Image (cartoon, coloured by chain):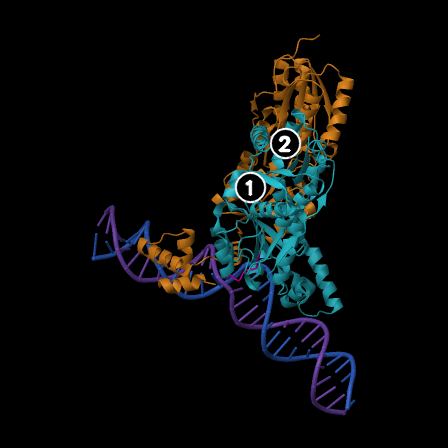
Chain colours: A orange, B cyan, C blue, D purple
DNA sequence: ATAGGTTGTCGAAGCGCTTCGACATCTCTT
DNA sequence: AAGAGATGTCGAAGCGCTTCGACAACCTAT
């Protein structure tokens, strides 16, 4: 293992000079710099992470807490995680993967041990039990998701409320009066996950304004659950012509069941999905959808965090504006018969 | 930030004693141990990760390299990643998330800097460019996936060749003579990803033995691609009655298209999928499938790695035996008409 | 020509921990 | 009763780096 001292010796300078070449925190003459860089290359030197962390009290690691649960759409999580990792690298940080398993203790452990310089939390609940810890520490953090009380926190999220409103707006705008919302699994609501509830709020308040009716039903993914849910919906509101789906694993079942029941999309019923674009275009009907901007969320989170770590940056809530793309699954409501 | 020295002072012992209490590397009297543990708790002490890494040259971090690509089934990756992270924690390790982006350089960086004690590599290609580096370093590593040459490496993987064989066996056993294989996206084969090619090998050699015909077609996921692929298959082999699908995003499109064409599953055609059980049971037809044991792979990988780090453990290739579960998508081949 | 500023380099201290050898006590043997 | 072996504790060295203050050496500007 090559050390700084060896590089220094090889280049004929002192250790501190090598350190300053590496960090750029003091000016170094061009000739010296080049000599040092040459030595670094020749010896294949890599600074030791532990020593660096100890001396500088900076680990250059960002912790990412992802949930264990699988009741949320996994590809979105993954996409965020990957965006976080790659963005972090461009700023010189590595990413430590923490699962929800440890719960709030993980926050304590990471903060206390200096393992990471900062954290990103996913799957935030409205009253998340990690928040008090976060507020009481001076370690920078960013939430992906919005808790009930955001004072003293930095959050990045899609504007779910606006997302819900946008869906209703679109459907109401093309004449639908009875809208059913296929939501996430019941457990998601029971946990009071922010995004699910906020979407619903947005949906409902816009519906009130637009004078349309909304029926919300949580739904586990899969065909059987969807069949049951759908039956109940048409039972209760036979006039339903618009669907909003916020549950990726319910999308395909819904389309298949509608088809099976002889309800044509978009002639008889319209469907708007809240899902990544990739899902929307790969479905059996190209779906009108509001995109979940997973990459953007991950990137934003890291960039805010890095800003904070650099002493720039402030606590703030960044809501990404939703965008609805009209595709083949929505159209004018059929004339009431 | 509480330090070891402060704990020592608080407990009225020397720093080294506290260290030995923590590590258990020397015997400590019960009374002293308790006093120290008490102090640790009272002060809320957490050992500093950097200092520890520096002094012990052990970071207690395992690096996990996951691919960037999204042409493989993401939930499986995620499941492995989560299994790795949770299993690692039970052994006192944290997980560093590396994306494929950096390529082989990431291996150099992590090895050289002592950031991680060991690595787990996913998405292994037959001639993976990271392998030479891995072989030339003494840092323990485990591959999830099988390269062409495994000498000096430890690998964990599903026995894909046996998986392919098993699928054919099942279909041939219930009378199917013409089998079509819907594979992963073409890019996966072009990259020479081990699992895809091995499955195919297993499929083909067993087919030869069983005297059945196999037609393999790579397929991007989604409806349009699947429609095209399916049309070509029936065009070339109208008598096809058995399908093997190794591409989660083609499963549902396939079922929908078959239904649409009036081919009943399993009466007219049988479908065997290679996918996680969850996908198999959530599909519109409960699928006969060979499970991809994602969790098991992740767990195994970590356990082998930890064994190596503890000085136990050897280089070896662990192939997990595939298991086929018969569900509702496969049945006797229709009598030839 | 000289005070005052830059610029580039160095030495040394110290980050918080692990670990080794030393040593003081005990507890058996014989 | 004395030596041998456990057992429990301590002090000190050192892991590889960052960073601070010091100080030459070189510029200006007067």
Q: Residue B314, relative to residue A214: is it above or below?
A: below
Q: Do the residues labelled 1 and 2 touch (CB within 8 Å)?
A: no
Residue range in magenta is: B137-141
Q: Quadrant of the rendered structure where residue A6 is? A: bottom left
Q: Using a 10 Å C-alpha cutoff, classify the residue at mark 1 as few (fewer than 14 neighbours), some (14 to 19) or many (20 or more).
A: many
Residue A114 x %, y %: 58, 52
Residue B302 is situated, as x and y percent measured from the top left of the image, at 63, 54
Residue at 64 percent across and 21 percent down: it is: A271
Q: Would you name the residue on which mark 1 appears?
A: A82
Q: Quadrant of residue A213?
A: top right
- Chain holding disc 2: B
| Residue A3 shows up from this direction | yes
Across and down, in percent, residue B236 comes to 56, 32
Q: In which quarter of the image is the C terminus of chain B?
A: top right
Q: Which mark is residue B254?
A: 2
Dividing the image into 4 quarters, which one contains the N terminus of chain B?
bottom right
How busy is the neighbourhood of tag 2: few (under 14 within 10 Å), some, or many (20 plus)?
many
Mark 1 or 2: the one toward you: 2
User: Is residue A48 visible in the rendered structure shown here?
Assistant: no
Q: Do labels 1 and 2 share a chain?
A: no
> Which of B282 and A145 lies nearest the eye of the viewer?
B282
Task: Decide whether the magenta segment is chiefly helix, strand or loop.
Answer: loop
Task: Indicate the position of residue C19 as horizontal and vertical percent values.
Answer: 59, 69
Q: Nearer the viewer, residue B95 or B302?
A: B302
**Up/down of A102 relative to B243, above or below:** below
Query: SS for tag 2?
Result: helix
């Amino acid at each position: 293992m090559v050390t700084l001292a060896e590089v220094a010796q090889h280049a004929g300078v002192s250790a501190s000079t090598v350190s300053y070449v590496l960090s750029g925190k003091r000016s170094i003459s061009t000739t010296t710099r080049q000599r040092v860089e040459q030595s670094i290359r020749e010896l294949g030197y890599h600074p030791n992470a532990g020593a660096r962390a100890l001396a500088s009290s900076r680990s250059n690691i960002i912790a990412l807490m992802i949930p264990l649960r699988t009741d949320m759409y996994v590809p979105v999580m993954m996409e965020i995680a990957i965006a976080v990792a790659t963005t972090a690298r461009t700023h010189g940080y590595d990413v430590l993967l923490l699962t929800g398993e440890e719960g709030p203790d993980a926050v304590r452990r990471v903060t206390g041990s200096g393992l990471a310089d900062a954290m990103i939390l996913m799957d935030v609940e409205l009253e998340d039990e990690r928040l008090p810890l976060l507020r009481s520490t001076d370690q920078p953090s960013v939430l992906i998701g919005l808790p009930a009380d955001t004072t003293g926190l930095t959050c990045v999220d899609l504007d779910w409320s606006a997302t819900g409103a946008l869906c209703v707006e679109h459907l109401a705008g093309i004449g639908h009066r009875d809208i059913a919302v296929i939501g996430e699994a019941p457990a998601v609501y029971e946990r009071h996950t922010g995004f699910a509830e906020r979407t619903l709020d947005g949906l409902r308040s816009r519906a009130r304004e637009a004078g349309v009716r909304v029926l919300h039903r949580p739904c586990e993914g899969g065909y059987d659950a969807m069949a049951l849910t759908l039956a109940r919906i048409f039972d209760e509101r036979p006039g339903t012509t618009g669907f909003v789906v916020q549950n990726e694993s319910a999308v395909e079942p819904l389309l298949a069941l509608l088809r099976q029941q002889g309800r044509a999309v978009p002639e008889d019923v319209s469907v708007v999905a809240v899902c990544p674009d990739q899902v929307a275009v790969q479905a059996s009907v190209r779906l009108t959808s509001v995109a979940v901007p997973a990459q953007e969320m991950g990137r934003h989170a890291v960039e805010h965090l890095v800003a904070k770590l650099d002493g720039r940056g402030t606590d703030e809530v960044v809501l990404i504006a939703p965008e609805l793309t009209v595709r083949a699954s929505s159209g004018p409501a059929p004339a009431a018969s």
